Image (spheres, rainbow, N blue to C red):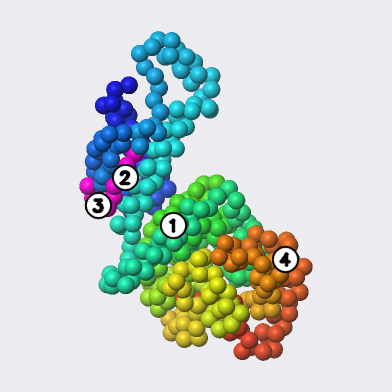
Amino acid sequence: MGKKLKVESAKFHFLSACRELSSNLPHAEKIEWNKCIDNFRFEPTGTKLEVFSELSDTAYIDIDLTKVRFYLRGDSENMIRQQGEALLMFAEDHVRDTNYEVFIKAAQQMLKHHQATHITKPPSTHDSEMERYEKEEQFHDDWADSVDISQIDVMRANEVCTAPEMRYIYQELGDLTGKRVLDVGCGLGEVSVYLALKGAKVTSVDISSGMLRVTSALAERYKVSVDVHLATAEGLGLPEGELFDIIYAGNLLHHVDIESALHQFHKHLKQGGLLVTWDPIAYNPAINIYRERAMDVRTEDEHPLRWKDLRLYNEMFSKVNRRYFWLTTLIIFVIMALVQKREPNKERYWKIVIDEAEKWKKIYRPLEFLDRILLAIFPPLRLWCWNVVIIARK
């Protein structure tokens, strides 16, 4: 096949892959992405095809043509052989499969560049804030790239005994059928997909395009529909007047400007709607030691909630309920560190405790009961817990 024909074929396959990605984007982002696709510029250079976006100076990728496979042409014997193979072994068409992998990865890379330049941020973002956003985005993009989606168990992540925050939240929310839910800081999408499985209409927001790709893929795997939206918590960039029955932000606020985020949530919450958040608290010395050791699996700007942060909810919402979790149950993490000697920079303890829930059940259940008694008798101990769930009504 001539070089010109190869380039034209590569352009066709790349554009097809780009348009395939449109199906997982919400309407507004789909329009912007399709505009970007219509304005791609292609430049063949040696064995590479360079792709530029006319809408963004930073949107640029290379497609390595040496990795692209083409059907042979010209030799009648080859033509007959390949056509026969395609008919008899369509599910194992190696040319098609190889090309799909090459072009879908290239399209995902270009989409990532495009989204990075169109991410919704607060209107008056200073350079220091921009740097923080970029670090958060890169950290979570890298995390998303390391994940095997087939290993994510949505039911386990939300229902096991060592996920007390989620069990409490779902108990309080009740029937979710038809409810509009905004999941801010959706991460890998375990909660978004679970909510969709329970009948909610879910919009998932994250600063990381990588995390949104994982969320979309996870939703597809579980055969549910989830809209994704790239934005920060402090600048959601949603249409004026778009309101939700429930806004959920799990393990998010200690990464962001809490007051700004709460204002955004209040703005997009229906009257009578619920804001549900949970985050770590700042005061337990054992947890603070762990935070100092586990710097590779955390971002440097994290700021666990303090009492002044908890009081902000009361200034904006009419009814605020708090429930605290993990006091004596923190013994499990001590065992991980001191007995099992698990490296906190290689394993995320808060993920392990979910994945290994069955192993910890015999220890966790009685300690959870003890926590309830201690927190009821000695309320000040609540600030020594690991996490707080807050449910606030507008």
Pick whichever, 388 or 281, lies toward us. Answer: 281
Q: Quadrant of the N terminus?
A: top left
Going by the numbered disc 2, the residue's amino acid type is Ile
Going by the numbered disc 3, the residue's amino acid type is Ser
Pick whichever, 14 or 198, lies toward us. Answer: 14
Going by the numbered disc 4, the residue's amino acid type is Trp
Q: Earlier in the sequence, mark 2 or mark 1?
A: 2
* Helix, strand or loop at mark 3: loop
Q: Earlier in the sequence, mark 1 or mark 4?
A: 1
Q: Is residue 56 magenta?
A: yes
* Helix, strand or loop at mark 4: helix
Task: Name the spot of residue 301 as percent of width and height, x first.
Answer: 43, 73
In the rendered image, which residue does mark 4 sit on?
360
Q: Is residue 50 magenta?
A: no
Q: Residue at x 40, y 78 (%)?
A: 259
In the rendered image, which residue does mark 3 sit on?
56
Binning the other alpha carbons within 10 Å of mark 3 as few (below 14), some (14 to 19) or many (20 upward) gives some
Binning the other alpha carbons within 10 Å of mark 4 as few (below 14), some (14 to 19) or many (20 upward) gives some
Binning the other alpha carbons within 10 Å of mark 2 as few (below 14), some (14 to 19) or many (20 upward) gives some
- Residue 141 numbered mark, or none: 1
- Residue 61 numbered mark, or none: 2
In the orientation shown, which residue stands out farthest toward the top? 76
Relative to 41, is 143 on the left or the right? right
Pick whichever, 181 or 287, lies toward us. Answer: 287
